[in-house]
């Protein structure tokens, strides 16, 4: 069925019977499919043409009267489609009195189902997004933890290397001190261990003998681990260091005394040798003859080498 030129909602019916109008309304009511409101059509502006159709006059002959009706209908203004009193729109209007409650209920149910579907879809999307964000955050944390673990591992290796170096140097130092104490003369050990011969402000020292000394020379740390709390590592190492310091101090004093005595002996020997040589020259030197006239005594003796006292002292005899 063709649409009316006035509105897409109205349907144009070609009149049948005793009508001469170009078209009539199907119904004076318009129902809204969106809000189910009933709207009324104002058919007053139709005027004479609507009256002629409504009264159902018999068909008239062609002539001036039909021409007047057509002119009157042509002079009428087109009716404006009224908006819906419920929703204020015209797109959902339908001709006639209709009840769209079942359709609206079905649409509401479909809208509810689509809303539920959208809700579940949104929940699934949010779960997927949160899962992706959680995985990204977990990956970031794993990477940071791996970097931190690598830094801590390198730092731990560096600290361990430094500490091993410190412990090795300290162990070597103490082991060397133990060897020095073991190689020292027993008299020096007895002097070091005698508290009456040292300042009272210095701590007393101790040392080991027998099997304990053998174990200490082998591995003093293992020995100290088995000694218990009475002999700590700090106490033992400080004792060894003080013991070695006192031995070195005694050795320096002894070396100074030995050097002084040796210098005294060498000086006495040199003085004795020089005196003996001087006395020998005085007793065994030939008498000097007077020099001939005209010759200087210094000139006559210039070509003869003379022995010096330094040569006598060093060689112990005269030079020939």
Image: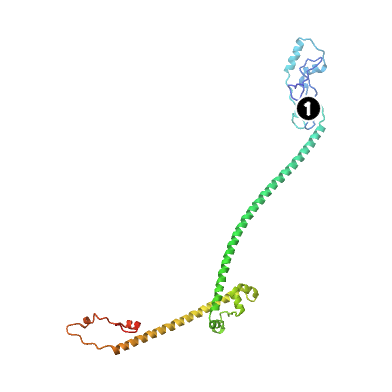
Report the colour scheme.
Answer: rainbow
- Vertical order, 296 against 218 (above or below): below
For the residue labelled by badge 1, is the local secondary structure a helix, a strand or a loop?
strand
- Which residue appears at 54% of the width and 74% of the height? 176
As drawn, is 55 to the left or to the right of 314? Answer: right
- Disc 1: CA contacts within 10 A as few (<14), some (14-19) or many (>=20): some
Q: Which image quadrant is residue 242 in?
A: bottom right
Q: Nearer the viewer, residue 269 or 242?
A: 269
- Vertical order, 255 against 115 (above or below): below
Residue lying at the far front of the rendered structure: 320
Q: How far across and how far down the image is residue 110, in percent?
A: 78, 36
**Residue bearing mark 1:** 94
Q: Is residue 128 visible?
A: yes
Q: Nearer the viewer, residue 189 or 64?
A: 189
Q: How far across and how far down the image is residue 162, in percent?
A: 57, 65
- Vertical order, 131 against 243 (above or below): above
């Amino acid at each position: 069925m063709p649409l009316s030129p006035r509105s897409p909602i109205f349907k144009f019916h070609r009149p049948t019977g005793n009508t001469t109008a170009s078209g009539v309304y199907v119904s004076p009511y318009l129902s809204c499919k969106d809000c189910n409101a009933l709207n009324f059509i104002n058919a007053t502006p139709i005027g004479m043409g609507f009256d002629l159709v409504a009264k159902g006059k018999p068909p008239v002959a062609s002539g001036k009267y039909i021409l007047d009706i057509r002119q009157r209908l042509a002079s009428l203004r087109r009716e404006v489609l009224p908006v819906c009193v419920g929703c204020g729109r015209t797109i959902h209007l339908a001709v006639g009195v209709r009840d769209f409650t079942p359709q609206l209920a079905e649409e509401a149910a479909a809208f509810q189902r689509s809303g539920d579907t959208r809700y579940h879809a949104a929940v699934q999307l949010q779960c997927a997004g949160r899962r992706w964000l959680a995985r990204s955050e977990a990956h970031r944390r794993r990477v940071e933890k791996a970097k931190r673990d690598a830094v801590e591992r390198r730092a731990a290796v560096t600290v361990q290397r430094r500490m091993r170096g410190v412990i090795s140097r300290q162990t070597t130092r103490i082991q060397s001190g133990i060897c020095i104490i073991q190689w020292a003369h027993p008299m020096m050990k007895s002097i070091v261990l005698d508290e009456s011969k040292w300042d009272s402000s210095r701590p007393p020292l101790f040392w080991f003998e027998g099997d304990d000394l053998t174990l200490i020379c082998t591995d003093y740390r293992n020995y100290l681990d088995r000694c218990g709390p009475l002999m700590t590592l700090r106490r033992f190492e400080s004792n060894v260091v003080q013991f070695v310091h006192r031995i070195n101090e005694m050795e320096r004093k002894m070396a100074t005394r030995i050097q002084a005595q040796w210098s005294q002996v060498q000086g006495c020997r040199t003085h004795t040798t020089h005196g003996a040589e001087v006395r020998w020259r005085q007793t065994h030197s030939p008498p000097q003859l007077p020099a001939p006239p005209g010759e200087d005594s210094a000139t006559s003796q210039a070509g003869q080498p003379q022995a010096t006292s330094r040569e006598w002292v060093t060689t112990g005899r005269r030079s020939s």
